[in-house]
């Protein structure tokens, strides 16, 4: 799934991705140039010239014929390197934001089609609770595991090209040393798991010896700190727990091993220079050592990027599970159990079956401004399945009642944490997917235009998308305030059709302001429309 998504993202943003990749590559290349220019400085300052004494003996670097021109060239390249570095970082973050924004719109479309039954048995919530964490891992997967990783590979290849051009024997020694070191690091990464198993036995003498020996490597305490959290991680996602432990082990190994690899490469360079004095001039020797000091952190980034790709793929699997939920039952499950609801008007109790009901109150906005006040309003008036919801806990009440308001969208717990964290984002094809589950007679048409940033442009659109999200809420009770306030008359019939699609398994309460003369006409209103019960909340 992730490969196809990245390919589509590349096709849609070729220019931007090329700019980011080339900027990072240019920054790394200029760093290599700066290190090689140090050899040029030794040549100009001390007159160390041989056939291979200068690796940058070509235009425009050949223009540096004295120290003054060298300082000017070095300063210009340093400024360019800093500019490319920060520009690449800024544009890389911008690419990541666009990637996640597009993916969130896709995921929101999938969430709209998840059957209600999955919310009621918390099946869908298992995947959505890690929604923000998965998005962060996917962003790192794309930026660090693919985009910047490819530029680091190019730099490593270029490093060996420079070394082989300088001295073939030195290049072979370095290549063999790095390959051997990579296999050793992977072996340590696999075998270090034994230390975490031995660690569980505090009385083990072997563990005590290993802990003392490797304490300076800062390995044991890193693993210990993360091992405490294993049980907590496993409750959320077992794969992410393993990846977190593995990341700690890798960081401990690479943080210790990479400096040793650096020293070995420098020692290898000095030995070759000592045995082949004519082949490697002093200026090239200095440049090579500086290149080694720069390239080893790049090697560490390449090795460590594997954990970013692993955690990113795990997050993609979570997103894919979320997408698959929309395909198992073909849309919203409307065959849910009926609920029995009664609402009290004064001293009398009235039976409310699932459907649309209107309640009038002098100050309805007070309750929508604070859902806690809305809870006090509803819990004393509503009886569900023969018992008042006044006895329910706050967490249970939030699962039953979902307040909907045009200013806040859906402010109930289920829609806040499970359905859509970004309330003001509406999918471009959300209405089409909504129509897919409606009968042909009830299918709707509306131009759902959005701004460049994806935010809704009008209160009416906010109201419509709030109702669409309410269609997929697990809450059996939906409360709206001033529903038709910002909806044009031509669109009100469409809103009523949306609400009628909910009345099979939801109790829809329209909270409207109380007007004068309503009490006198209350009985007439009840006789005119049997589907609407007008109640005065006292």
Image (cartoon, grey):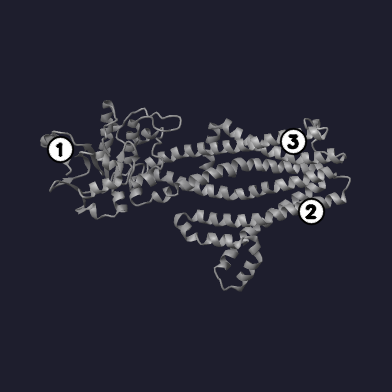
- In the picture, measured across the screen, residue 537 lies left or right of residue 210, that is left
**Mark 2 or mark 3: which comes first in sequence?**
3
The front one of 315 and 405 is 405
Q: Residue furthest top?
A: 490
**Mark 1 or mark 2: which comes first in sequence?**
2
**Which disc is residue 530 wearing?**
1
CA–CA distance in space, label 1 to label 3: 85 Å
**Number of numbered labels in the structure image:** 3
Q: Position of residue 32 (x, y in %)?
A: 72, 40
What residue is at 53 percent from the left and 61 percent from the top? 227
- Is there any visible trace of residue 167 in the rendered image? no
**Which disc is residue 267 wearing?**
2
Q: Position of residue 536 (x, y in %)?
A: 16, 41
Q: For residue 259, what is the image quadrant?
A: bottom right
Circles 2 and 3: CB distance less than 8 Å?
A: no
CA–CA distance in space, label 2 to label 3: 28 Å
Q: Position of residue 37 (x, y in %)?
A: 77, 38
Q: Secondary structure at mark 1?
A: loop
What residue is at 30 percent from the left and 45 percent from the top? 371
Q: Position of residue 306 (x, y in %)?
A: 60, 49
**Which disc is residue 74 wearing?**
3
517 up-or-down from 192: above or below: above
Q: Nearer the viewer, mark 1 or mark 3?
A: 3
Q: For residue 281, what is the image quadrant?
A: top right
Q: Nearer the viewer, mark 2 or mark 3?
A: 3
Callout 2: 10 Å neighbours few (<14), some, many (20+)? few
């Amino acid at each position: 799934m992730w490969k196809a998504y990245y390919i589509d993202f590349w096709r849609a943003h070729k220019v931007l991705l090329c700019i980011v990749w080339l900027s990072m590559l240019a920054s790394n290349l200029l760093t290599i140039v700066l290190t090689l220019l140090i050899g040029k400085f030794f040549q100009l300052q001390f007159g160390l010239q041989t056939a291979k004494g200068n690796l940058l003996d070509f235009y425009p670097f050949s223009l540096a014929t004295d120290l003054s021109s060298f300082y000017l060239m070095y300063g210009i390249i340093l400024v360019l390197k800093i500019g490319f570095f920060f520009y690449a970082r800024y544009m890389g973050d911008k690419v990541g934001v666009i990637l996640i924004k597009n993916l969130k719109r896709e995921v929101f479309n999938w969430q709209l089609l998840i059957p209600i039954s999955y919310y009621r048995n918390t099946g869908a919530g298992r995947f959505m609770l890690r929604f923000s964490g998965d998005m962060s891992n996917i962003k790192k997967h794309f930026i660090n595991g693919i985009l910047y990783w490819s530029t680091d590979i190019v730099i490593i290849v270029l490093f060996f090209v420079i070394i082989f051009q300088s001295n073939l024997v030195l290049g072979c020694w370095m290549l063999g040393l790095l390959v051997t070191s990579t296999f050793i690091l992977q072996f340590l990464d696999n075998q270090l798991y034994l230390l975490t198993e031995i660690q569980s036995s505090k009385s083990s003498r072997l563990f005590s010896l290993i802990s003392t020996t490797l304490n300076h490597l800062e390995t044991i305490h890193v693993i210990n700190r993360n091992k405490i959290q294993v049980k907590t991680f496993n409750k959320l996602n077992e794969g992410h727990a393993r990846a977190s432990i593995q990341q700690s082990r890798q960081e401990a190994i690479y943080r210790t091993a990479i400096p040793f690899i650096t020293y070995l490469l420098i020692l290898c360079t000095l030995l070759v220079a000592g045995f082949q004095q004519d082949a490697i001039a002093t200026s090239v020797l200095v440049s090579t050592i500086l290149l080694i000091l720069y390239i080893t952190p790049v090697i560490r980034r390449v090795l460590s990027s594997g954990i970013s790709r692993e955690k990113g793929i795990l997050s993609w699997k979570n997103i894919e599970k979320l997408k698959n939920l929309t395909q198992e039952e073909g849309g919203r499950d409307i065959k849910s159990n009926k609920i029995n609801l009664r609402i009290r008007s004064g001293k009398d109790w009235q039976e409310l079956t699932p459907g649309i009901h209107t309640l009038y109150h002098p100050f309805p906005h007070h309750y929508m401004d604070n859902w806690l006040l809305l809870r006090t309003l509803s819990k004393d008036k509503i009886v569900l399945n023969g018992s008042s919801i006044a006895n329910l806990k706050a967490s249970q009440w939030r699962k039953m009642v979902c307040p909907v308001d045009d200013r806040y969208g859906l402010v109930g717990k289920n829609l806040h944490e499970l359905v859509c964290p970004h309330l003001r984002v509406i999918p471009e094809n959300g209405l089409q997917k909504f129509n897919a589950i409606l009968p042909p007679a009830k299918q709707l048409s509306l131009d759902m235009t959005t701004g460049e940033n994806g935010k809704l442009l009008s209160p009416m659109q906010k109201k419509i998308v709030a109702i669409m999200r309410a269609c997929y809420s697990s809450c059996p009770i939906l409360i709206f305030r001033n529903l038709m306030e910002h909806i044009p008359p031509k669109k009100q019939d469409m809103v009523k059709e949306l609400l009628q699609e909910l009345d099979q398994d939801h109790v829809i309460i329209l909270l409207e302001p109380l007007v004068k003369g309503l009490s006198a006409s209350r009985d007439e209103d009840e006789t005119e429309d049997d589907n609407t019960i007008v109640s005065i909340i006292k």
